[in-house]
Every structure is written in C-alpha cells, then in structure tokens.
Image (spheres, rainbow, N blue to C red):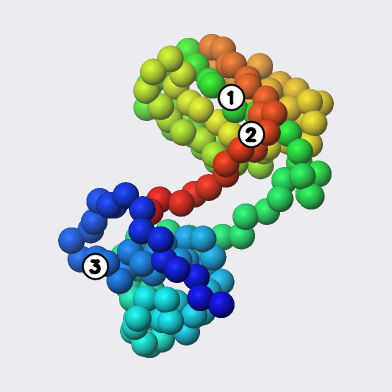
Amino acid sequence: MTKQVVKSAAPVKNSAMDDKDHDILRLIQSNAQLTAEAISQEVGLSAPAVQKRLKKLRDTGVIEKEIAILSPARLGREMTVIVQVVLERESRMHLDAFKRKMCKAPQVQQCYYTTGEADFILMVIVKDIKEYEAFTQEYFFDESNVSRFTSSVVMDRVKVSLDII
C-alpha cells in the first residue's frame, strides 16, 4: 500500500536540502520505522540514495532523535498538566538551576523557557492529582526561587504531535 506524500505549507528550507530531503523527512516524522526501501518507493529514489540522505540528515542534526511515542493512559500516567512557572530571580545561575531540575524531573515531559508572563511553561505527566501534588511540593513549594505557578489540567488530548513539516 503506497502512502502519498502530502506537501504542507512551504517549509523554510536549509540551503543544503532539496525537495527529496523534505519528502523523506515528512515520511519519517510520522513513522520512523519506515525502511529505506519503503521510503524509496514514495520519493522516487533508490534505497541506497535514501540511506545516504538519512545519514546526512542525522549527521547534520536535522534529525535530532528518533523516538517511540508512548500512551500515557496505558502506562498509568493519565493526567497531563500544563504549568506556568514564574521565578523570583532570573539571573543566569537561577535560570540554569531551574532548567537542570526540570530536565531531571521524570514527570516533566516538556519544558520551555518563555517570554511573557511566565518564565517557564511545562508539560507534566502524572498518574493522578496526588502525584501532581507531590511534584509541586518537591519542585515548586520547596524551591525558594519559584514565585508562583499556575496549573491547567488537560481534559482531552486533541492533538499531540512533534511534526515540523
């Protein structure tokens, strides 16, 4: 069964990349397990040419990581909370310390240092409200540099994607 490559709005192109590279990226961002042979049939290149392009895309950092997306619900982590965090002090030392803590926190799926009202926006995945409360105690209430935080509990996962092109 052939899957048609659907072209979305014109992406900003790296000058070293061409349309074939973008076609390959569109395919593997939705299924990183596709073989070079399967990709070659879709983009009109030989399998060795696809392998060479994939290696270059990995080596240059265009492809940062190939991951499996797990089901939080099937793993007993049914609660997603979007958290806005405001720090008391924003020196480089304080920012770096908070970033390191969030990188080590297993409940934090994503962490963004942002402009605007909040200094950080977090995506936190937990089993239930009790686990979230324990998380807030450890990372916010016990942290003297956290001025305040606001939590929004996700009611429905409408779209979850890391697609770029």
Task: Measure the alpha-carbon separation of dots 1 and 2.
Answer: 7 Å
**Residue at 77% from the left image edge and 44% from the top image edge:** 73
Which residue, given by chain and number where applicable, does mark 2 sit on? 124
Q: The disc labelled 2 sits on which kind of residue?
A: Val
Which residue, given by chain and number where applicable, does mark 3 sit on? 18
Whether label 1 touches label 2, CB < 8 Å: yes
Task: Return the residue nearer the eye: 81 or 107.
Answer: 81
Task: Measure the alpha-carbon separation of dots 2 and 3.
Answer: 37 Å
Whether label 3 touches label 1, CB < 8 Å: no
Q: Secondary structure at mark 2?
A: strand
Residue 23 position within the rendered picture, expressed as x and y whole percent measured from the top left: 36, 67
Q: Quadrant of residue 148?
A: top right
Task: Measure the alpha-carbon separation of dots 3 and 1.
Answer: 39 Å
Residue 26 position within the rendered picture, expressed as x and y whole percent measured from the top left: 41, 62
> Is residue 92 positioned above or below 29 on the image?
above
Q: The disc labelled 3 sits on which kind of residue?
A: Asp
Residue 107 position within the rendered picture, expressed as x and y whole percent measured from the top left: 67, 38
